[in-house]
Image (spheres, helix red, strand yellow):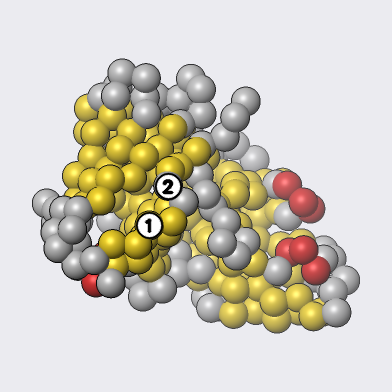
Amino acid sequence: AQSVTQLDSHVSVSEGTPVLLRCNYSSSYSPSLFWYVQHPNKGLQLLLKYTSAATLVKGINGFEAEFKKSETSFHLTKPSAHMSDAAEYFCVVSRAGSGNTGKLIFGQGTTLQVKP
Amino acid sequence: KAGVTQTPRYLIKTRGQQVTLSCSPISGHRSVSWYQQTPGQGLQFLFEYFSETQRNKGNFPGRFSGRQFSNSRSEMNVSTLELGDSALYLCASSSADASTDTQYFGPGTRLTVL
């Protein structure tokens, strides 16, 4: 069975400081991993995606994530937070194969607050 | 390319009624997945359609159903609405293998059941 755990429900940073959103996953097979962002009253936007190529994945808006198989982690980072980064972030896992098609498994989300 | 569109954006219904939500995928995408988002349960997978066939289904009661048309547009239907069905319903489209390909989400339909 697959699952994903976001270790912090709420993260608060000051503008211009680094962002770290933590995610651990559980999967019996090589997973695909994603980070999505949701701004208030909006749909989900893909930030980045890992599918067993490079372990360091670069995404949009300066975000990146590192896949660490030994730690079963896929933490999201950004060197310098911007006010517009304030949103809810979801770590997501999926797996190929029949019985899994179309099914993304979402973490509970981390709310990122950015203080001026 | 136009993104995923969902209609209507907001709906208010009363208990016992039924509702139909619509989703138009990105042009060329043949897979459509549906998700329910609530504060308590988070985002949960409802079902996925590909070429007019349901390929996968989540753990929701039979009151939740869907279908997909030949142009890949999809609808989901909820019958005998309950208060707990109040949620944001999101659909997502992808090109083929929706489990590993990127899913692109629409803005959602906010359903309120009174």
Residue found at x 64% / y 40%: A54
Q: Secondary structure at mark 2?
A: loop
Can you give x and y, in whole percent of width and height, for residue A25 in the image?
A: 45, 61
Q: Does residue A113 appear anywhere in the picture?
A: yes
Residue A16 versus residue A52 in the image, above or below: below
Chain ID of residue with mark 2: B
Residue at (36, 40) in percent of width and height: B22
Instruction: Using the image, determine if residue B5 lies above or below residue A28.
Output: above
| Side of B82 where A9 appears, left or right | right
**Label 2 CA crowd tier, 10 Å (few <14, some 14–19, many 20+):** some
Q: Are the residues flagged by discs 2 and 1 in contact, CB closer than 8 Å?
A: yes
Amino acid of disc 2: Pro
Check if mark 2 and mark 1 are on a common chain.
Answer: yes
Q: Chain for mark 1?
A: B
Mark 1 crowd level (few <14, some 14–19, many ≥20, 10 Å Cα): some
Q: Where the C terminus of chain B falls, by quadrant?
A: bottom left
Residue B8 badge: 2
Quarter of the rendering occupied by the N terminus of chain B: top right
Give residue B63's position: percent from left, percent from top: 14, 53
Instruction: Give me the C-alpha separation between circle 2 and circle 1.
Output: 7 Å
Circle number at residue B11: 1
User: Image point 76% across, 75% down: which residue?
Assistant: A114
Q: Label 1's element?
A: strand
Q: Residue at x 36, y 24 (%)?
A: B72
Amino acid type, mark 1: Leu
Is residue A26 shown above or below B106? below
Frontmost residue, A93 versus A68 = A93
Residue sitting nearer the eye, B89 or B30? B89
Which quadrant of the figure has residue A11?
Answer: bottom right
Near-viewer residue (B12 or A37): B12
